[in-house]
Amino acid sequence: MNKFAIILGDPNSINSEILAKSSAKKSNCFVIGSYDLIEAQLKILKIKVKIEKINDIKKFKKSKKKLFILDVPLKFKKPFSVKSEQISKYIKKSFDIAHKLSVEKKIKGFINCAIDKKNLFKNKSFGVTEFLGHKNKTNHSEVMMIYNQKLSVVPITTHVKIDNVPKLLKKKLILLKVKTLDKFYKRYFKIKPRIAILGLNPHNYELRKNSEEKKILLPVINKLKKKFKLLGPFPADTIFMKQNIKKFDVIVGMYHDQVLAPFKALFEFDAINITLGLPYIRLSPDHGTARNKIFLKNSNPNSLDKCIKIMSKLPG
């Protein structure tokens, strides 16, 4: 079982363009999304790609010439100006289909193209990682990893306000995330990852008694060292220097921008988003909907192609 799906994602985006430009039609995958929407958008953009509507994945067959679309009906008047209330139902339906096919082992997992999460989640602290964790009842052990072959990063807390981060940092949470991370690398990449753990405060708050580093991180790191290739806590201001990052496969930070900001400064969008800890594989390109670029027709499918390449190689 090596088939996988690509969720088209947000209608008001560059997703149809990058999908058409990508290697999807040459891969063992089909698209979950609105056939009519893709057809209309590609017509406006004057991009010629053969597409075929299917209502059952049994009718999908690998082809180097066309994209198979597992149709999710969507009503729209203007192809790039779909109303937000329609978008929410449409994307959730697409995710429900991909999730069901994955847990039933009919596909090994899916890639989702970019979505605007404010159209999808009422809870502003929710992203796709948290949404799928909740859907799969992972009990917060799911992990958001931004992956590059040279270095990956993982935030312990994800889409939360910065003043909530210290309240959410618990020894159990860090233990769960590191175990999930190590298990994924061993299963899919066949290596025991070298992990760096960052502190929370500037200069690790000099490891003072009342610091999170002293109260939470040092005890949990000492425990984790016994089972995993892991060091820390490192101060965040120096860990991303060249001589440091080559020593590690993954850098684990305490909050989203602590690791994603320097990572993107190093690699820009040469990366993909992987959700670890699910019963299936979920990837996504590491870029947004780019609504300002819809009609420019110069969007780069590189990140989606990396997702397709990695998904094709990973075992089901």
Image (tube, grey):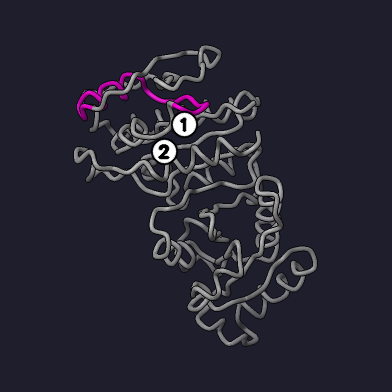
Location of residue 136 in the rendering, given as x and y in whole percent from the top left corner:
62, 38
**The C terminus lies in which quarter of the figure?**
top right
Q: Residue at x 45, y 14 (%)?
A: 54
- Please tell me which of labels 1 and 2 falls first in the chain: 1
Task: Kindly identify which residue carries mark 2.
Answer: 113
Circle 2 crowding by C-alpha within 10 Å: few under 14, some 14–19, many from 20: many
Q: Residue at x 37, y 45 (%)?
A: 118
- Which residue occupies the extreme right position in the image? 226
Q: Disc 1 vs disc 2: Cβ atoms closer than 8 Å? A: yes
Q: Vertically, is 256 above or below 25?
A: below
SS of the residue under disc 1: strand
The disc labelled 2 sits on which kind of residue?
A: Cys
Circle 1 crowding by C-alpha within 10 Å: few under 14, some 14–19, many from 20: many
Q: CA distance from mark 1 to mark 2?
A: 7 Å
Q: Vertically, is 24 above or below 143?
A: above
SS of the residue under disc 2: loop
For residue 65, which quarter of the picture? top left
Location of residue 144 in the rendering, given as x and y in whole percent from the top left corner:
55, 52
Name the one closer to the observer, 219 or 165: 219
**Does the magenta segment cover residue 42?**
yes
Location of residue 88 in the rendering, given as x and y in whole percent from the top left corner:
39, 34
Relative placement, left or right, of 10 versus 214 is left
Q: Vertically, is 87 above or below 152?
A: above
Task: Kindly identify which residue carries mark 1.
Answer: 6
Part of the protein shown in magenta: 26-46
Name the one closer to the observer, 192 or 167: 192
